[in-house]
Image (tube, grey):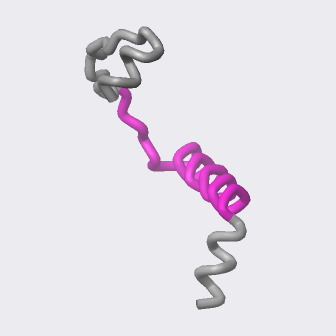
Amino acid sequence: MLNETKKYGVNIVERPHVKANKKLDLTGGCGKQIVHSETKLVLRTHKNTFRKLADM
């Protein structure tokens, strides 16, 4: 890594660790909708992966 930084003239910079400060409430109707839409997105995004796992 050090050789690559010299080669391209890139300096390594320390980045601060950012903590999540929001709490996500998944109770009630809104929470159910969030879980449902995220599940649909994951199933659509990783359709082939789930198909391969089902065929095992």
Q: Is residue 25 magenta?
A: yes
Q: Main secondary structure of the magenta part?
A: helix
Question: In the rendered view of the protein, which quadrant contains the C terminus?
Answer: bottom right
Q: Relative to residue 20, is residue 7 depicted above or below?
A: above
Along the line of sight, which residue is nearer the eye, 40 or 31? 40
Q: Relative to residue 39, is residue 11 depicted above or below?
A: above
- Residue at coordinates 37% horizontally, 15% vertically from top-left? 6
- Residue at coordinates 31% horizontally, 12% vertically from top-left? 13
Q: Is residue 30 magenta?
A: yes
Q: Relative to residue 38, is residue 50 depicted above or below?
A: below
Along the line of sight, which residue is nearer the eye, 9 or 49? 9
Along the line of sight, which residue is nearer the eye, 29 or 37? 37
Residue bounds of the magenta highlight: 22-46
Q: Quadrant of residue 54?
A: bottom right
Q: x, y (%) of residue 31? A: 52, 47
Would residue 25 appear left or right of 55 to someone viewing this image?
Answer: left
Q: Quadrant of residue 21?
A: top left
